[in-house]
Amino acid sequence: MQAIKCLFTYGFCRSWMPGLVKTCSLLLVASALLSACSNNDGTLHTGADGQSSLSLQPPSFLTTRAIVSENLRLEVTINGFNVNMTRNGASSWTGTTTIAQGSSVELVVQWAETIGARTLPLAQARSSLATINANTTFTVLESGYDTSAVNFDADGDSISNIEERRAGSDPFDASSPDAGMGDPPLVRVPAVASTLVPVIDGMFDMDGRWSRAEAQDANQNLLLIDNLLVDSANNQIDGATGYQWAALHDEVRLYIYVFAKIGPSFADSAEAFNNDSLEIFWDGNFSRGNAYDGVDDVQLIIPLVNPNRNGGFANNSVDADSAVQLGVNSESGFALSGNAPFDLSTLEFATCTCTGTQIYWEVSIDLAAAKIPLGQTFGFEIQINEDLDGGNRDVKWAWARPSKTEDEPGTQADDTFRFPSRMAPIRLTPFPDTGS
């Protein structure tokens, strides 16, 4: 008999915050292959007891965006016979079977996701060997997985199940893909259960809660805040910060994590934007106007340091005087419309300099108070102000607004606070409709 002693492994941890999740790099080295025992190969080895053991982890493309990893299901067959796979922890399955030495083998691995009472097949890979002998090796490349709509299209709309899950449409409803959702979003923010949302304390939750957040755009680019808008000293390098953001939601609140590196922290100016601070912009109905409409166009400025606490770090969860401000055009727009401004008491945030000059902002925004929709495209932007030496701000960085050009001297490129049209389209992907 032939024993399979291979550990199939995949890099499923998305290292979107350098230095925060140190185990990610260890897993990513094997991300090109489904199988990785030695030199990224699976090894079949004859065991004295004739038992064949198999251990599997999901491929990386099944551990991103809206796919709920806790709901993944695995089915494995060898020569048409099911291998009973048992889940061990969050991301590992093991099983045993027997294979006669000298026989041919066809291995089929299929992944699915449970959504409500239904099971949605997502991907399948096959690997065949003509003859099993001791120390036989084989590999299954990620490109060998089939996720096509030809074989994986539950609602028959010619869009694959995995594409629909990534798009936030209902894979069981042929009429749902992007219908009435507005412009295609640059970023799709995934939904997680309320029991899995982060604790707003400024610390990166090492239990994996933030690993569920979206940290890339639709083009697989990291959500970097490195477009240079303001450089008063003319000594900054555009595109070189490494500042990043990521987000998730639970259909009630939007959770945002921002990573940056800022030197000495200052809060000596009355205007929050002239201090070290984070700016979050949104345009709830994506009207893309050239003025703040007083309805759902908001600029929120969150300080790094609370000027009311003698330089102590700001934390709105415990400080009534955290000095959070709305942008001047947000205030004036709301005043002109007669609507109440965004209620700052609904905001939760915390800041931290957890490792020297490494700065984190952790923010939670009430969706109803912010008039941010579910399943609809809306405008969004993240920017960071840096005050390097006290006094007025010296540098400003943006995620979506393009970097300043030679034709935009001074602060001309800093115009998102004036023009909501500068924001980029994103969408909060809702939980799928599981039907009745």
Image (cartoon, helix red, strand yellow):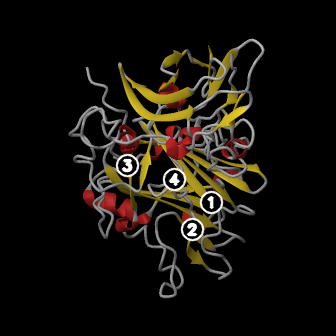
Circle on res. 216? 4
Q: Residue at x 23, y 46 (%)?
A: 179
Residue 357 lies left or right of residue 397; in this view the side is right
Q: Earlier in the sequence, mark 1 or mark 3?
A: 1
Q: Quadrant of residue 95?
A: top right
- Marks 1, 2: nearer the viewer: 1
Q: CA distance from mark 4 to mark 3?
A: 13 Å
Disc 2 crowd, CA 10 A, few/some/many (<14, 14-19, 20+): many
Residue 303, horizontal then vertical, whole percent: 60, 56
Residue beneath disc 2: 397
Residue 164 lies left or right of residue 137; in this view the side is left
Q: How many marks?
A: 4
Q: CA distance from mark 3 to mark 2?
A: 22 Å
Q: Earlier in the sequence, mark 1 or mark 2?
A: 1
Question: Type of residue at label 1?
Answer: Tyr
Residue beneath disc 3: 427
Residue 226, horizontal then vertical, whole percent: 58, 66
Residue 132 appears in the figure: yes
Residue beneath disc 1: 243
Disc 3 crowd, CA 10 A, few/some/many (<14, 14-19, 20+): many
Q: Residue at x 57, y 60 (%)?
A: 224
Disc 1 crowd, CA 10 A, few/some/many (<14, 14-19, 20+): many
Q: Earlier in the sequence, mark 4 or mark 3?
A: 4
Question: Type of residue at label 2?
Answer: Trp
Residue 92 lies left or right of residue 291; in this view the side is right
Residue 400, placed above or below residue 310: below
Q: Nearer the viewer, residue 431 or 251?
A: 431
Circle on res. 350? none
Q: Quadrant of the N terminus?
A: top right
